[in-house]
Image: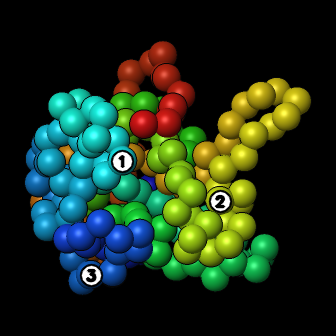
Amino acid sequence: MAGRVTAVSRNETYVFSKPNRESITLLAGLGVEGDVHAGETIRHQFRMTYEPDLPNLRQVHLMHEELFDELALKGFDVSAGQLGENITTRGVDLLGLPTGALLHLGEQAVVEVTGLRNPCAKINDFRAGLLGQVFSLDRDSGEFTFKSGVMAVVRRGGPVRPHDPVQVELPPPPHRPLERV
């Protein structure tokens, strides 16, 4: 599987959306340089209050741009960085990846996919009704659907820019499906 980066975003403060940048730098074991969620331990604002010493499995948030196309068909105008992601991609089935998949971004950077982003109610503050489009419960099966991207940790640092290639390296089988982190 191959795809490309379409946008990169970061923010130094805890706000929902992240402004697009010309480039970001990934730091091994930490996340996006200058981003509020970078660090070895949890940086998610809510989870820091009750699990502050757990490893940060959410160093980098990746979102598939195809979601924005899907949302536009339902009347929601959403673009890169607005849902808080750091890296927006096209042509990569992020949600279909197994846990532990490696994404080679550009010439140097490598991230390891740790799980699905668990969307929060702040999505509805951004656009009313949007949470129901990126998170749902199938009443018959009891299964949840998470569409708001994947989380990853940085295995090898380096710069990432729009138009950089994304190469997927699958882990050895058996593959474990993504769970929320």
Which label lies toward us, 2 or 3? 2
Q: Earlier in the sequence, mark 2 or mark 1?
A: 1
Residue 154 position within the rendered picture, expressed as x and y whole percent measured from the top left: 21, 46
Disc 3 crowd, CA 10 A, few/some/many (<14, 14-19, 20+): some
Q: Label 2: which residue? A: 131
The residue positioned 35% from the left and 71% from the top of the image is 15
Residue 129 visible? The answer is yes
Which label lies toward us, 1 or 3? 1
**Amino acid at dot 1:** Phe
View extreme (front): residue: 49
Which label lies toward us, 2 or 1? 1
Residue 121 position within the rendered picture, expressed as x and y whole percent measured from the top left: 57, 57
Query: Can you tell which quarter of the image residue 16 is in?
Result: bottom left
Relative to 129, is 31 on the left or the right?
left
Query: Can you tell which quarter of the image residue 114 is in?
Result: top left
Q: Which mark is residue 62?
A: none
Q: Label 1: which residue? A: 46
Residue 135 higher or lower than 20, as above or below: above
Q: Which mark is residue 21?
A: 3
Colour convention of the picture:
rainbow
Query: Can you tell which quarter of the image residue 133 is in?
Result: bottom right
**Amino acid at dot 2:** Leu
Disc 2 crowd, CA 10 A, few/some/many (<14, 14-19, 20+): many
**SS of the residue at dot 2?**
helix
View extreme (right): residue: 140
| Real-space Cα separation, disc 1 to disc 3, in angstroms | 26 Å
Residue 162 higher or lower than 130, as above or below: below
The residue positioned 46% from the left and 75% from the top of the image is 82
Question: Can you say which quadrant of the picture contains the C terminus?
Answer: top left
